[in-house]
Amino acid sequence: MERRLPVYLLLDTSGSMSGEPIEAVRNGIQLLVSALRNEPQALETVWLSVITFGKQTGTAVPLTDLNSFQEPTITADGGTPMGKALTELKKSIDQNVRKGDKEKEEKGDWKPLVFMLTDGGPTDGNDWKNASNNLDRKRIACFIACGTPGYERSVLETITGDPANVIELQTANSDQLSKFFKWVTASITGSVKDIAEGEGEITGIGSLPPPPGEDEDVL
Amino acid sequence: MIGASEIEYVENNSTIDDIAIDFQIPNGKVGDRYQGEIDLFNDVEKIKTIYGIGKIGGVEFDKKSNSIIGTPQNAGEFLIEFDCLVKKKKVIKLIVNQDPKKLWKNIESNQEHKVDDDSLFLQSPKHEKDIVVASKRGRSHEHNGTQRDDHYDVRFYDDWFISIVADGAGSAPLSSLGSKIACETAGNIIAEALADLDKKQSVVDAIDEYSKNNTNAEAKKKLKTQVYKIIVTAAYEAHKAIAMEAKSKGEELKLYHTTLLITICRKINQGYFVGGFQIGDGISAILKKGEPVKLLGWPDSGEYAGQTNFITDARIFKTAEALMERIYVEYIQDFDAIYSMTDGISDPLFGDEKNLKLTEKWNEFNNNVTEALNLENGVSPDKNLLKWMEFYEEREHDDRTLVIIL
């Protein structure tokens, strides 16, 4: 049975992202998909979904295989309703990521990787906290959150469930964001390789290449 | 500006009540110079016909300025209709994905422990059967420039055929060496045992007895015991050899994890004795057309986590009973082929494990492989088999090893 590696991108599309940041995000998605499409092992395993949170919050692209994936139209506007995005994430995982069945001897999909990007704090009161609590992190292989100036570290630490999984960029400019997306691509490719070689899924940020911001020469 | 070809002017009879108006130009006055621009023609490629301009008298349509120009002669409410060809462009994006086959690279490994692809055709005038074997590095390893983890050892020894096949675990970094040590050691130990006249005689006697009546449970048990002495010893020695290597290098044994499939065969009393033993996945079997397939083992599927068992795991050798369960013996009149393979072959060609029990699946497999052996005339069958192993199947990129005694 086909075991897919689901990858979720949770992207902040609030008003403050408009201009260079959102353009960099669009380019980032394009480059990520392009790069993964050139990796035959990724093509066979990765399914990608994009969830945005801003004025438009929800699933911009449902979990789709790389061959069929089409870039969403993304615009920056509005606030930062993280709660809604997390609820949408949970819904998608529950509905789309196949669980294994011991009795039927079916293995199910690999646990998803989640990459979140934000440039601010949540603007939906305590919704984000409730949604974060409802999220079953046991069903996620690794939840990474990246903040650019304006973000709230404690919020992201709560959401990811692990301070080590929160990374930050110095600025939300095209150079830094491009590095972030390149790192996400490398992380996904590495994960695919581990799976192909029988290592199983990754279990934490430690199994991924060093994120940007820590080692400028990573990529 | 709109296309400059001839415009046709025609009278119209439309009244305001029966037509929707797109644009109203500024009002004019009889006798006053008039110019009214029509801001409608952005998507218009060409105006074919203008209806109703004549009624006004004294004005015309100027293509350069998209305006009605002139001095109107008659008063009234006029509808001027423009019959146009709209030039609206539609842009569609089409993404065409690359053929995934073209994305796979083939990077030679450092070939430290073995060559990337290997094959052998063993013929012996003494034996009526030959051995053909091929072991191919999987696409995954080719793409990453890493070594083949599979290994084999096949030989004739005296009257015997010996086939050993091993699959090093993908996640174990030293498994390429592990599978090599396992095969070479097991092969040597079995040959040594068969060189020992006493041991050999014991097993030959046991085979003899069993061949005369293979429903005799006692005879079968005796035979399995003799086979155990030879084969399980070989497997255990293989385990010890890897353990010694690990110790000498200061590495953990689990880094060398490998499966092991042993098959021995001997002609006797106008028939053939075949013995099999397996730890891990993959499969061995005897095939004869018109008869049900005879399996010589069964793949271990370890925990639900999808792992299998390895000879590098000391727990395998814990109880003699468990090991005895792994010994298969058959006495047959003749056979078309004896197969032994790693899961790099059994997975794509049989799919679900349960299909390994189906004779029709094996017949299909046999036809497939027989055709493959004769792929190219004048080319040695093992080379043909290696070529056949290049077949592409999505998600099946493991090393491939197949031994055929035929």
Image (spheres, coloured by chain):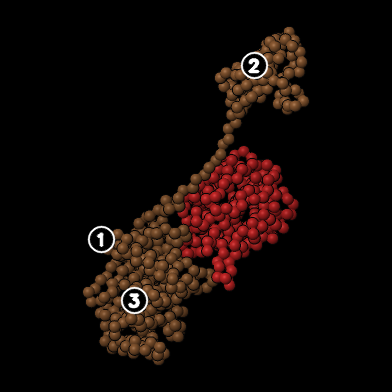
Q: Which chain is brown?
A: B
**Of residues B84 and B324, the one drawn nearer to the viewer in this rendering:** B84
The disc, 2 or 3, on the residue closer to the chain's N-terminal end is 2
Residue at the farthest top position = B31
* B317 w.r.t. A91: above or below: below
Q: Earlier in the sequence, mark 3 or mark 1?
A: 3
Quick one: SS at disc 2? strand
Q: Chain of mark 3?
A: B
Disc 2 residue type?
Answer: Phe
Vertical arrangement, residue B9 with respect to residue A165, above or below:
above
**Could you tell which of marks 2 and 1 lies nearer the N-terminus?**
2
Chain shown in red:
A
Q: Chain of mark 2?
A: B
Identify the residue at image location x=60%, y=45%: A72
Residue for badge 3? B335
Q: Residue furthest left?
A: B125
Q: Which three-letter amino acid code belongs to the residue tagged 1?
A: Gly
Amino acid, disc 3 = Phe
| Label ID, residue B61 | 2
- Examine the image and state in which quarter residue B398 appears: bottom left
Taking the image as shown, residue B32 lies to the left or right of residue B235, namely right
Q: Are marks 3 and 1 on the same chain?
A: yes
Q: Which mark is residue A80?
A: none
State the mark number for residue B378. 1
